[in-house]
Image: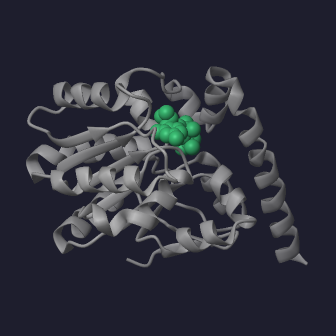
Amino acid sequence: MENKISLLGAGIHNVTMEEAMTVIDSFVAEGGLHQVITLNAEILYQAQENQRLLRLINKADLVTPDGSGIVWGANYLGMPLKERVSGIDLLWEICRVAPEKGWRIYLLGAAPGVAEQAAANLKIKYEGISIAGVRNGYFDMSSQEEVQSIVEEVRQAQADILFIAMGAPRQEYFIEDYGKEFGVKVAIGVGGSFDVVAGVVKRAPVFMQKMGIEWLWRLLCQPSRWKRMMNLPRFVRLVKKTKKKQGS
Ligand code: UDP
């Protein structure tokens, strides 16, 4: 599965949602850990100054274009991507097919109570879904004891797919550090998705998603995001600079 483009040093798979699902299906069948990253422009910009993060992205088994910024950047540099495959949409799609595939799902992340509510909502929406376990994402990462007890909790649950919603890149580092110990076949970082599934945060209206301005909705709902969102105009500037260099 090597239909990849390279954007600002990061490999991104040029897949549709359907193709991403076929790949994930093969990961589960194959066994062993597979890391999936749903990459947005903020994180890709951050990776320009963070070698660990860039390396991690390039090592992942599947990297999907999560944000419209990535789709725009790739297109602008002459490498059009088929479509945006966001973390939240991937979560919905995996949970939709999970009952018929028999995939066991673990939800790790978000504030206390949110993963439980997300699991309850998923059980109503997708009858027969098997939720292997849930756990909030607020723990002391520097405490080996606490981390090990969470790793053990996940391992005991014998899940196939682990969604981690602790924000990027924290969740990606967590998967890199402990992924193999979880005993899951697929681990995916899905940012703030549990908040949406639980109904704590509302997703942008479809017209905003289609216009590529979901970031504006998130900024309006959570103004405290402005600081990290400064990476978006920086990303645009960097893509434009890259194009100029290509032309010269
Ligand atoms: N979160 C968490 N543990 C932490 C910090 C954050 O579980 O130590 C959760 C937080 O409650 C939220 C999600 O991680 O549900 C981060 O959401 P955000 O929208 O910031 O995700 P991103 O945009 O980084 O993908």
Q: Can see residue 154?
A: yes
The image shows residue 60 at horizontal and vertical percentages of 46, 70
The image shows residue 3 at horizontal and vertical percentages of 46, 75
Relative side of 93 to 245, left or right: left
Q: Quadrant of the C terminus?
A: bottom right
The structure residue drawn at horizontal position 11% and vertical position 53%, both measured from the top left corner, is 101
Given residues 187 and 233, the one toward you in this image is 187
The image shows residue 27 at horizontal and vertical percentages of 26, 68
The structure residue drawn at horizontal position 67% and vertical position 72%, both measured from the top left corner, is 51
Relative side of 91 to 9, left or right: left
Q: Can see residue 83?
A: no
The structure residue drawn at horizontal position 67% and vertical position 22%, both measured from the top left corner, is 220
Given residues 122 and 138, the one toward you in this image is 138
The image shows residue 212 at horizontal and vertical percentages of 62, 39
The structure residue drawn at horizontal position 25% and vertical position 31%, both measured from the top left corner, is 119
Give residue 93's quadrant in the image.
Answer: top left
Q: Is residue 195 above or below residue 153?
A: above
Q: Quadrant of the N terminus?
A: bottom left
| Total tally of numbered discs in the picture | 0
Q: Is residue 116 above or below residue 176?
A: above
